[in-house]
Image: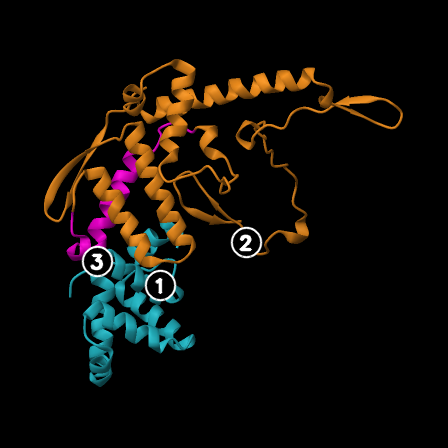
Amino acid sequence: MANTSSVTVILNGKEHVVERAPLRAWLELEDIRDNIKKAVEIGNRDDVACHIYSYISTALHIEEDFSSISWIEVSSVFNAIFSLNLPTLDFPLLRSRIKPGQISWDYEGRSWYVWLHLLASAYGWSSEYIAEMDIDDAIALSQEILVEEHLDKEWQWALSERSIKWNKQGKGTFQPLDRPDWMQPVRDIKIPVFKLPQSILPVGNIIRWTDDDEPLAS
Amino acid sequence: MNPLPLDKALELYSLLKDYLPDKVDSIIELSDIIMNSIVEKEGFDNYVKSLSLMSGIPEKILAMRDKNERVSLFMEGLLVNEVMELKVFCESLGM
């Protein structure tokens, strides 16, 4: 599944070949992207620009003075690096709509240790090995670990008395353990087909097209 | 006139954001739409600030210049800075 693709970008007249980032470097880029989002949310334009410069510098491993480089070049390089580092599969884990709140044990750069802990405790791999993993592999395996953990929790929950809700008549009903939003069943939305009443159809001639693309009024 | 660096381009976008159309066919049409929208929304300050930003000419000096010259500079600035592309980029950032 490993994706070894790369892109060539030109910044300030110099050509750079950028490889797709492995897990640890990708998490660093994602942390910077979070900072960009935060700066956008609070409307701090200078910080938005600074974090975009930081994103590019981190990905290209360079120290560059961006003040003389046009926004067109910067945005083009930023978009190229961002697209290169997108996961190639549509992981439900990444589609979570709930934003994590600020927690007291959080700190700058923690995301790497969260992923390292998750993967190392499940598979016993070294931090060097995990740091160099392809992001698709890392996300897919992390999702499997989290699914397995949650299904275990559901099993334990089902065995506990707290999973039964009793009514006044003494009848118990099983209450399943809530799943995170990315584990919710996929809803199949079906659009009903119905006939439009004639009164709301547009008036006038209907133009039909023949096989040789000549319009004919009817 | 040269394209602006990113921090200045983001400032330009914040000045012109409210006047930019979704789609245009030519730079003349874009300039017309922006100018009309600026007049309609009484955004003359933003016009002068954005013009000063793009041209590097102080606002006071711009005020003394001929009106047609200002319009011409404004159009050149929009063209050089690819303002519609700037809008797409800023929107992709969520701005």
Q: Amino acid at mark 1?
A: Ser
**In-front residue for pair A105/B72:** A105
Q: Amino acid at mark 2?
A: Asn
> Is label 3 in contact with label 1 (beta carbons under 8 Å)?
no
A50 and B39: which is toward the camera: A50
Q: Based on the displayed image, in which of its 4 quarters is residue A196 positioned?
A: top right
Mark 2 to mark 3 CA distance (whole Å): 55 Å
What's the CA distance linking mark 3 and mark 1? 14 Å
Image coords of residue A12 (percent x, y): 13, 49
Q: Residue furthest front?
A: A105
Q: Which quarter of the rendering shows the N terminus of chain B? A: bottom left
Q: Which residues are magenta?
A: A64-90
Determine which residue is flagged by label 2: A205
Q: Disc 1 is attached to a residue of which chain?
A: B
Colour scheme of the picture: by chain
Q: Colour of chain A?
A: orange
On whether disc 2 and disc 3 are found on a single subunit, the reply is no
Q: Label 1, on which residue?
A: B14
